[in-house]
Image: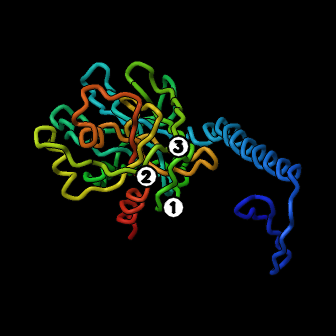
Amino acid sequence: MYQFNKDANSILVQHGSSLSRMELSTHSRWLILIKLLLLTTFTRAHAAADLPALITQLKPSVVAIALYNPTAAPRLKLLGSGFVVGSGNVVVTNFHVISTPADIAKNEAYVVLSGHGQQPRVHQIKQTRTDARHDLALLEIDERLPAVKLADAEYIAEGTELAFTGYPITGVLGLYPATHRALLSAVTPIVIPADHSQTLSAASVRQMRDPFLIYQLDGTAYPGNSGSMLYRQDNGAVVGIINMVLIKKSKEAVLSDPRGISYAIPVKHLHQLLQQLQP
């Protein structure tokens, strides 16, 4: 182990359980600093190089959420994104994606679409479990699909390099998953107290009663990305769920046209919802 002292003129070298101090020349200090810089650059480049492989690995777990109506044209109305977790028969999405009741009189029903392109597979939803406060929903299907790995419940550090994959503007771009890079800009409350009551929305008032922390991202999500998985670029572990409605209504109520900022629900709340499925 090597450790710089305060003035960086020497380092502590560990031999077993003992430490000894080694004085450094100016030349040696520069060599060490250059090596550290190269190591950092290599680590970032390695993570970037891994992203294409991660996308290939994770895409089979990406699904779309649609409203099926046998009498409508088209029969499938694409609403949002989702991803598969657990044993492969549980799909995660946002609650607001499926919050409007389907019209039973018209034989409407929410369905999950897997596969990509022109011929997706349609999966009936057997059971739904929701967490409206954190805008999460779990949809149980019959078939088992490839599942993603969830990160631990702890909040991740600001500055972590992330990516999210889903179906932006699905009605126009079709069922072709798209991936966007995102840096974790901040871990921030879902709502900030307003200067005066005129800027408060109903959603903001509800959230202020019991606020929770969310992830603020510098990547841009689009309609249809709601429910997309947000994952680390270094190992593919899912750390959050992209949200485009609940959070923006609470956090950006005073902005008429916000741009370039997206948000995600931390995965800790998904862990809590998944625990309810355990017998």
User: Left or right: where does residue 255 sit relative to residue 182?
Assistant: left
Indicate the amino acid at tag 1.
Answer: Asp
The residue labelled by disc 3 is 61
Indicate the amino acid at tag 2.
Answer: Val
Query: Quarter of the image containing the C terminus?
Result: bottom left
What distance separates the C-alpha of mark 2 from that of mark 3? 11 Å
Q: Earlier in the sequence, mark 1 or mark 2?
A: 2
Pick the residue in front: 66 or 185. 185
User: Left or right: where does residue 106 sit relative to residue 224?
Assistant: left
Coloring applied to the structure? rainbow
Pick the residue in front: 92 or 142. 92
The residue labelled by disc 1 is 152
What distance separates the C-alpha of mark 1 from that of mark 2? 18 Å
Percent x, y of residue 67: 30, 33
Tell me if mark 3 has few (under 14), some (14-19) or many (20+) residues whose alpha carbon lies within 10 angstroms of its own.
many
User: Left or right: where does residue 151 sit relative to residue 12?
Assistant: left
Percent x, y of residue 27: 88, 49
Give the residue drawn at x 86%, y 75%: 15
Q: Which of marks 1 and 3 is nearer the N terminus?
A: 3
Percent x, y of residue 22: 86, 67
Q: Nearer the viewer, mark 1 or mark 2?
A: 1
Tell me if mark 2 has few (under 14), some (14-19) or many (20+) residues whose alpha carbon lies within 10 angstroms of its own.
many
Indicate the amino acid at tag 3.
Answer: Ser
Tell me if mark 1 has few (under 14), some (14-19) or many (20+) residues whose alpha carbon lies within 10 angstroms of its own.
few
Element type where label 2 sits in the image: strand
User: How many numbered marks, from 0 up?
Assistant: 3
Q: Nearer the viewer, mark 1 or mark 3?
A: 1
Which label belongs to residue 90? 2
Mark 2 and mark 3 residues within 8 Å of each other at the beta carbon: no
What distance separates the C-alpha of mark 1 from that of mark 3? 19 Å
Residue 170: which quarter of the image? top left
